[in-house]
Amino acid sequence: MNLRSFEKFNYALRPAKNIERKMMCEAFGRLSTLASLRRYRYIGLGGLSFQDFALLHQRLGVHDMTSIEKEEDARERFLHNRPYSCIRVRWGSSSTVLPTLSWRKRTIVWLDYDYPLDDSVLADVRTVVAHLCSGSVLVTTVEADPKRVKSARNVAKARLDALRERVGEEKIPRGIRGADLRAWGLARVCREIIHNEIIETLAHRNAPLAGRWRIGYEQLFNFHYADGAQMVTVGGLFLNGADRARVPTDHFDDLGFVRSGNDPYHIEVPVLTWRETRYLDARLPGTAAVPHHPSWIPEGERRKYASLYRYFPTYLEAEL
Amino acid sequence: MPSPPANGTQAGHAPVAADASPTRALFIEMLTRDIGLIPAIVDLVDNCVDGARLLRGKASFDDLCVRVETSPGELRVVDNCGGIDADVARAYAFRFGRPPGAPFVPHSIGRFGVGMKRAFFKVGKHFRVQSRAARSHFVVDVDVEKWAHADKSKEQVPWEFPFEVFEENLAQAPEDKRRTEITITRLHDDVADLFKQTSFEKRLAAEIESRLQTAIVSGLAITLNQLPVDRKPLELLDQVQLLPAYRQCVYGTGRERVTVKLYCGLGPSVPPELAGWHVFCNGRLVLKGDKTRDTGWDTVVVQEGGEKIPGFHPQFHRFRGYAYFDCDDAGCLPWNTTKTALNTDSPVYRAVALEMKSLMRPVIDFLNRLKEEKQGQQDPGEKGPLEILVESAVPKPVGDVATRSAFDMPKVRIPKKPKGPVMQRIQYDKPLEQVSRAKLALGVRSFKEVGEKTFEYWYDSECPE
């Protein structure tokens, strides 16, 4: 279906990413059952805007924050843009910096890459999973856009070859064909590869440990979204026996976006005006999504909005 | 239908069981097939080291010695490391495999109960073991061929090596009189040939030196054909910005507690065989300069000409990793029976390998950066700041170098090189005839230029700036 121009969102504002960030933040808040969030550390992959850092500091009170930033040439600019003084910047690539960090503290790590899954991403995942302590969270975001393959005779094969080149043959799950990588298929396979890496690393790490010291992984996030390129985010919680007992099994169940398996939560951003969102807000939670009400806002948009209105960003142009 | 009697026999018939007992000849064949001659001889010296451990514990091995002598006619290994108690010899030392209840030597390097016998069979057809321990003395003398074929008769022959002399409850011998002497004669032809070669002697000396360096450092004097086997210390670069990473991990409890010490950093660029990981179990070198997947090299990927090539590359010649596994119970350590390879499936090793990989990465990143720096120099003789730093560093023995929790990129001012656009190689195949015509039409000399010019032609017309 071709969208008319008023039905398109301005994706430069990255609304899906904004929603994803807030959803994850709400889930992180539930970690308080293990320890005050004040005692957690956050590690992120920098950027000039530091939006994830600002959110976790404002909403959860996380104080110990490390941003890994590879653009050392713009050192002063990055330091100037830090929204809070508690954010430390470690200069270098994630693969260079992650192995040098101490991992004694419970940590929320968000490896938020803006490029496709490759062996360096998997190496970072391995480094983190090999070291983070119980009660920690690892979230990984990668681009998973199959892209249009121009002028290749066999598009499916070209896609599979590209993935094989990036991650290596042995990481690709058995039975995957090139045709499986179209649309959101690549995102599904990327989630599986990252998940397998986590499970395999944990198996090695746990091998010599007695039962209660073994660390288990529980997936919480499996987001698909596209503010432009298609992206996949996969993440979850790492718990040993003692911490496992402190987190009720249904602890995250009421968060509608939590996904423990291969079926993703699609962040679909409704295209609505500010007046329309106000109108719907006044009827939520409740009747806004029912089919016949109100008919001048398309039902599909109403349903999308009802599923994520608590996280929906409002953008206003302001002259300051 | 009546069920067969529980004891496995049926009335009036022979027992219902097939004979599965091994033949001695098969045993000898199997034992010796998977070990080289040098590791087999080093195994004999390992037993001397275990004797020294039993005698002295963790104290110094000063005044203890092992003499190894090879000649075209025999191999002799003589030590003064406490002797083998006659009781132990009768019940355990000559058994194939380590029976439960065998005497326990903490931090031993003998574990499986095959090394000594396997070495006898590997080297020759006759062996003689004489030992004087604190209060006992024995001699065992065996013709291997006779022994191997003694079970050809139908009768059950017990698996034994008869004692020629067996004396117990003797007067206490002073420590320096307790000794063991092993002599193997009627050497196999290939062994006798090797014993004539000086290159073999050199290789054997090098193996003893590297495999048993911890014992040599503790004061054990080892000689090969009267010349001492000295230790060349393993080294790491000592420079405040290049200090190695050090990590200690502990797994298990009690006698099965495994302590692992890991060092990872830089060393001299030569010799290349020292680059890689060195893995020790209870002080015994198991892997020397390993550059394979076993020690995590499959996770190292180098970009060359747009291609990713995993594994060790010459730019990593300065890489040094040392992993020391230590446990009271040698059975908990991740080595195979020949002590020449790791059991990479062992639970402890699987966990430690993760640590090794994470310690490696910053060192690998540094060595890649060092290579980039060298390639970026206009004048090949010119040295960049990283190279100057590395060359100014002095190598020191592992234990004498300060360490840190992780290797980190040195903070040096690296002059920026002028950046050109990021390049991408394109490759494709087209019929030769067409390509040749294009070459002619373009007036160029190489196919590379055909590719470049046709791309430029297309780009200028279809992708205007």
Image: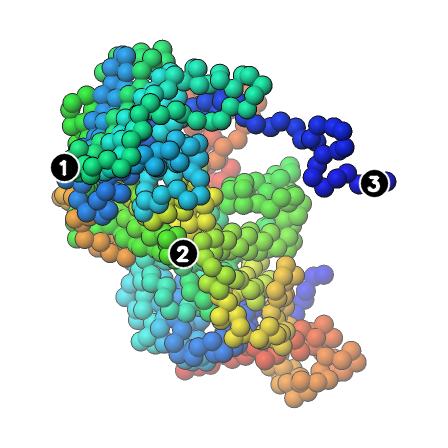
**Along the line of sight, which residue is nearer the eye, A80 or B132?**
B132
Callout 2 crowding tier (Cα within 10 Å): few <14, some 14–19, many ≥20 = some
Q: Residue at x 51, y 42 (%)?
A: A168
Label 3 vs label 1, nearer the camera: 3
Q: Secondary structure at mark 1?
A: loop
Q: Secondary structure at mark 3?
A: loop
Lateral position of residue B411 relative to residue A49, left or right: left
Query: What is the crowding at mark 3: few (fewer than 14 residues within 10 Å), some, or many (at least 20)?
Result: few
Nearest-to-viewer mark from 3 and 2:
3
Indicate which disc, 3 or 2, sits on the residue closer to the N terminus: 3
Whether tag 3 and tag 2 are in contact, CB under 8 A, the answer is no
| Image quarter hosting the C terminus of chain A | bottom left
Q: Is residue A57 above or below residue A123?
A: below
Residue furthest right in the image: B1
Chain letter belonging to callout 2: B
Three-letter amino acid code at disc 3?
A: Pro
Please say if A313 is above or below B336. below
Amino acid type indicated by mark 1: Asp
Numbered circle sitting on residue B252:
2
Residue at the spot of label 3: B2
Looking at the rendered structure, whether the residues under marks 3 and 2 are on a common chain is answered as yes
Disc on res. B63 = 1
Residue A79's label in the rendered image is none
Label 2: state its secondary structure.
loop
The answer as to whether the residues below labels 2 and 1 share one chain is yes
Chain-order first, disc 2 or disc 1? 1
- At 36% from the left edge and 23% from the top edge, which residue is drawn? B120
What residue sits 54% from the left and 79% below the top?
Answer: A314
Q: Is residue A110 above or below residue B165?
A: below
